[in-house]
Every structure is written in structure tokens, then in C-alpha cells.
Image (cartoon, helix red, strand yellow):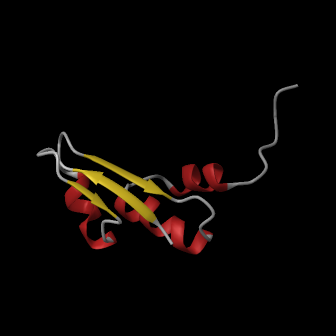
Amino acid sequence: MLHTFYRSSTGNVTIDLPVTEWHTALHDQTGLLWVDFNAEPLAMVEPPLRDTFGFHVLAIDDALREVHVDSVG
């Protein structure tokens, strides 16, 4: 289960903010939205990273890969 912490610009705190309210929270200029994606299946993590937060699909793939190969050498 995804866990969130949201502190609005007015100082109100909400724990486990529904996904449907993330977009509004992200547009709160001085608010803070923390989303814990730890140990979640890729199918649950990829859509919000792409659609809500706007990360590029290659950046998501790179961030979620378990093994990173060192290409320097």
C-alpha cells in the first residue's frame, strides 16, 4: 500500500492522501507531498510516476531497476 504525507501551505497535515488528490497537492506552491513507493509492485509505481509526477519512462525504468551496470571502465 502506498503511504503519503502531505503538509499543505496552510500547515494542515494529511496522512495517506488519496491518489485522486495528489495533482492538487502538487500544485500547492509551498506545500509538501511525500509518497512512499518502497516495496510496491512496478504496476502500482509506474503510472503515478509517469502520469502524476511527469517523469520520463526511461528515467522511471532506470530508477526502478534493481541492478545498475557500471559502464565506465
State the image coordinates of residue 49 (x, y, percent, origin top left): 45, 59
Against 34, residue 22 (above or below) is: below
Q: Which image quarter: residue 30?
A: top left
Please identify the quadrant where the C terminus is shown.
Answer: top right
Q: Residue at x 38, y 64 (%)?
A: 51
Instruction: Find the residue positioned furthest to the right.
Output: 73
Locate residue 62 relative to residue 23 in the image: left or right.
right
Query: Could you tell me how many numbered marks the image carries?
Result: 0
- The residue drawn where x is 31% and y is 71% is 18
Residue at the top extreme, as displayed: 73
Q: Position of residue 45 (x, y in %)?
A: 52, 66
Q: Is 48 located above or below residue 59 in the figure?
A: below
Is 53 on the left or on the right of 40, as rendered? Answer: left
Residue 21 at x, y = what percent? 24, 67
Return the residue nearer the eye: 59 or 35: 35
Q: Left or right: 45 with respect to 71?
A: left
Q: Is residue 42 left or right of residue 11?
A: right
> For the point 37% across and 55% down, which residue is it?
53
Please tell me which residue lies in front, 69 or 7.
7
Asked if residue 69 is positioned above or below residue 26 in the image, the reply reads above
Q: Residue at point 16% right, 45% down?
A: 11
